Image (cartoon, grey):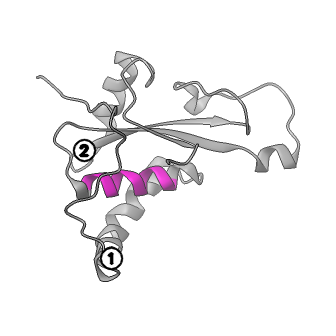
C-alpha cells in the first residue's frame, strides 16, 4: 500500500477547501499537473491541511523534532500523464523529507530528466505508471 505519509486523490474539502485549492493551483508551475498540500505533524498526531505555516507554542525536544514528519496530500489534474504522476510523486517525496517547495521545484527542474532516464534504464515503462488508488479524485478546471 501507500506510505502513511502520503494520501493521493483527496477531495477539495480534505485539501483545505476551495480557496486553498485555488491558491495552490495559482502557485504551481505550468508543467505541474498536480498539487501537493503539506502538513507537519508529530508521529501519531493529527494533520490539518492548512498546517503548512502553523507553529505551536509548546516546547519540543530534539527527539520530538526528529519525529516530525511531513504528511502530503497529492492530487493530480484530470489530464495528468504517467510522467506527471512520477513527477508529482518525486515532488511529494522531497516535501516529505523537509525540502521546501521552491527547492523541490528547482531540484525537479534540474534532476527529473536524469531520474526518468534512470527509471527507464532499470526497466520501468514510464508511459504506463498507475499510482492512484481506485477511489482517487482528480481535479478539473473550468475557466
The quarter of the picture where residue 126 lies is bottom left
Highlighted magenta segment, given as a residue range? 84-94
Residue 33 disc label: 2
Residue under label 1, please give it: 114
Residue 91 falls within the magenta-colored stretch = yes
Say few, some or many: other residues with alpha carbon within 10 Å of mark 1 (under 14 / 14 to 19 / 20 or more): few
85 vs 80, left or right, is right
**Residue at the spot x=28%, y=32% of the render?**
26
Say few, some or many: other residues with alpha carbon within 10 Å of mark 2 (under 14 / 14 to 19 / 20 or more): many
Q: Position of residue 117 (x, y in %)?
A: 29, 77
61 lies above or below 124: above
Residue 62 disc label: none
Nearest to N terminus: mark 1 or mark 2: 2
The quarter of the picture where residue 16 lies is top left
Residue 30 falls within the magenta-colored stretch = no
Element at label 2:
loop
Amino acid at each position: 500500500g501507500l506510505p502513511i505519509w502520503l494520501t493521493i486523490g483527496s477531495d477539495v474539502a480534505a485539501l483545505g477547501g476551495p480557496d486553498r485549492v485555488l491558491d495552490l493551483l495559482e502557485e504551481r508551475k505550468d508543467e505541474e499537473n498536480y498539487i501537493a498540500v503539506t502538513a507537519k505533524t508529530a508521529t501519531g498526531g493529527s494533520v490539518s491541511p492548512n498546517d503548512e505555516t502553523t507553529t505551536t507554542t509548546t516546547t519540543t525536544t530534539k527527539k520530538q523534532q526528529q519525529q516530525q514528519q511531513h504528511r502530503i496530500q497529492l492530487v493530480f489534474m484530470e489530464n495528468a500523464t504517467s510522467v506527471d504522476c512520477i513527477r508529482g510523486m518525486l515532488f511529494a517525496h522531497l516535501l516529505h523529507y523537509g525540502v521546501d517547495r521552491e527547492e523541490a521545484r528547482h531540484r525537479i527542474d534540474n534532476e527529473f530528466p536524469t531520474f526518468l532516464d534512470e527509471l527507464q534504464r532499470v526497466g520501468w515503462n514510464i508511459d504506463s505508471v498507475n499510482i492512484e488508488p481506485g477511489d482517487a479524485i482528480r481535479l478539473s478546471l473550468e475557466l
